[in-house]
Image (cartoon, rainbow, N blue to C red):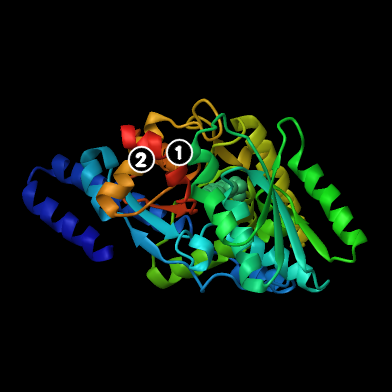
């Protein structure tokens, strides 16, 4: 950077003989150096040790194969051209884990099953929508660990065609050997699971019930740990990220990352999410509560306030699981330019939001942005009609 600034300065002084022009050139150079310098230093990790030590107190069943890869979206940057405003786009491949097709829920399930291991559970029950990725990955983790799995799935999306009812995650749940129960509309899936757990416990079974999306403070530790992983990768690659961007459903991914970055001294604002399930305000409140509870679990005294929780609700469209044109374009762009798959319900809408932010000039030239690819690609098969038409 120093050499770059010197080179810019000397070339400009050669060009401008007039004293006033030279002064103007010098001011430009100073401004350019200041922008570059502030971009490089705003996100330097402050305190990884404290978070590392706090996380060590929690048991974990390893389901990932180590840190997930970070890669640059060079072709999308090229396609965006001037609309990209000189921003550098990266993705963190949380979709690449080998177990069950991969996805963000594995990080949360590692902690849920870790805590339950102490009580020698033999059965796991969980809940979700019919095409729940969390349910599919819970089924896969149970298969790996030799546990019985029962899924309580509700019809949370107004769809009843064969692709949605029988393909995608529903198909995989069955292949992983889970026993699925479809919860009648109007009834609570969690209550149905709790009721079933009581029946099984009466038969001497050791049962764990994991709530929606695994998004409890314990589950959020998975993404606090991911924040740590990102900090180590930034240090190794000498690439501080200006912003980490995620989809927000049950809020555990955003909250876990926000808790992790808060504890490392970088603040919850390092994370921005796009809500796909509830509206913006409800999602921000849930994310704040979960961030605070996760920090309390980690023994961190300073809790963020609502202002520090950055949630955007503008890309959810008409509701959860209902396609938008922006989502379809984002999925197609990622596939056609990078050969990568993002899902139609979560990452597709969030990536659409990120692209809009970039195009609208929200970020400065040279900013490094990290989009977390959270998996969910089996959902593409459930949305066959949407992509076949477009
Ligand atoms: C593929 C995918 N991405 C993102 C999310 C959102 O994560 P969270 O529920 O932690 O907000 C989910 C949640 O189900 C998901 O399945």
Query: Could you say which quadrant of the image residue 235 lies in?
Result: bottom left
Q: Is there a contact, CB below 8 Å, between mark 1 and mark 2? A: yes
- Closest to the observer: 22 or 271? 271
Write the residue at 69% across / 69% down: 55
Mark 1 closeness class: few <14, some 14–19, many ≥20 residues within 10 Å: many
Q: Quadrant of residue 108?
A: bottom right
In the rendered image, residue 40, in percent from the top left (x then y), is placed at: 40, 58
Mark 2 neighbour class, 10 Å CA radius: few under 14, some 14 to 19, many 20 or more: many
Residue appearing at x 25%, y 49% in the figure = 337
- Would residue 264 be visible to someone looking at this image? no
x and y, in percent, of residue 17 in the image:
7, 46
Q: Residue 131 at what x, y percent from top left?
A: 56, 44
Label 1 element class: helix
- The residue indicated by pointer 1 is 349
Residues under labels 1 and 2: Cα distance?
A: 8 Å
Residue under label 2, please give it: 330
């Amino acid at each position: 950077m120093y050499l770059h600034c010197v080179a810019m300065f000397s070339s400009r002084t050669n060009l401008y003989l007039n004293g006033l022009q030279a002064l103007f050139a010098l001011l430009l150079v100073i401004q350019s150096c200041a922008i570059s310098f502030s971009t490089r230093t705003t996100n330097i990790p402050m305190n990884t040790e404290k978070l590392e030590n706090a996380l060590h107190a929690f048991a974990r069943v390893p389901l990932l194969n180590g840190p997930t890869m970070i890669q640059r979206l060079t072709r999308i940057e090229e396609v965006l051209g001037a609309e990209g405003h000189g921003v550098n786009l990266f993705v963190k491949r949380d979709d690449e884990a080998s177990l069950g097709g991969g996805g963000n829920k594995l990080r949360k399930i590692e902690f849920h099953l870790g805590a339950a291991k102490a009580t020698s559970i033999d059965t796991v029950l969980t809940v979700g929508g019919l095409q729940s990725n969390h349910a599919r990955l819970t089924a896969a983790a149970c298969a790996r660990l030799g546990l019985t799995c029962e899924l309580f799935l509700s019809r949370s999306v107004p769809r009843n065609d064969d692709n949605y009812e029988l393909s995608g995650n529903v198909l995989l749940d069955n292949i992983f050997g889970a026993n699925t129960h479809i919860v009648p509309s109007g009834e609570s899936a969690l209550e149905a699971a709790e009721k079933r757990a009581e029946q099984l416990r009466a038969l001497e079974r050791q049962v764990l019930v994991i709530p929606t999306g695994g998004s409890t403070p314990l589950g959020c530790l998975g993404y606090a740990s991911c924040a740590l992983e990102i900090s180590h990768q930034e240090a190794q690659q000498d690439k501080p990220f200006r912003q980490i961007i995620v989809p927000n459903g049950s809020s555990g991914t955003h909250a876990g990352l926000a808790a992790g970055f808060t504890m490392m001294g970088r603040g919850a604002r390092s994370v921005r999410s796009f809500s796909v399930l509830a509206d913006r305000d409800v999602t921000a409140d849930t994310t704040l509560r979960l961030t605070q509870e996760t920090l309390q679990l980690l023994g961190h005294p300073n809790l963020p306030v609502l202002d520090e929780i950055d949630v955007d609700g503008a890309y959810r469209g008409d509701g959860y699981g209902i396609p938008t044109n922006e989502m379809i374009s984002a999925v197609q762009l990622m596939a056609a330019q990078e050969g990568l798959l993002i899902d139609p319900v979560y990452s597709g809408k969030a990536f659409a939001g990120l692209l809009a932010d970039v195009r609208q000039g929200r970020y400065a030239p040279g900013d490094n942005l990290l989009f977390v690819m959270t998996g969910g690609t089996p959902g593409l098969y459930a949305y066959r009609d949407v992509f076949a038409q477009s």
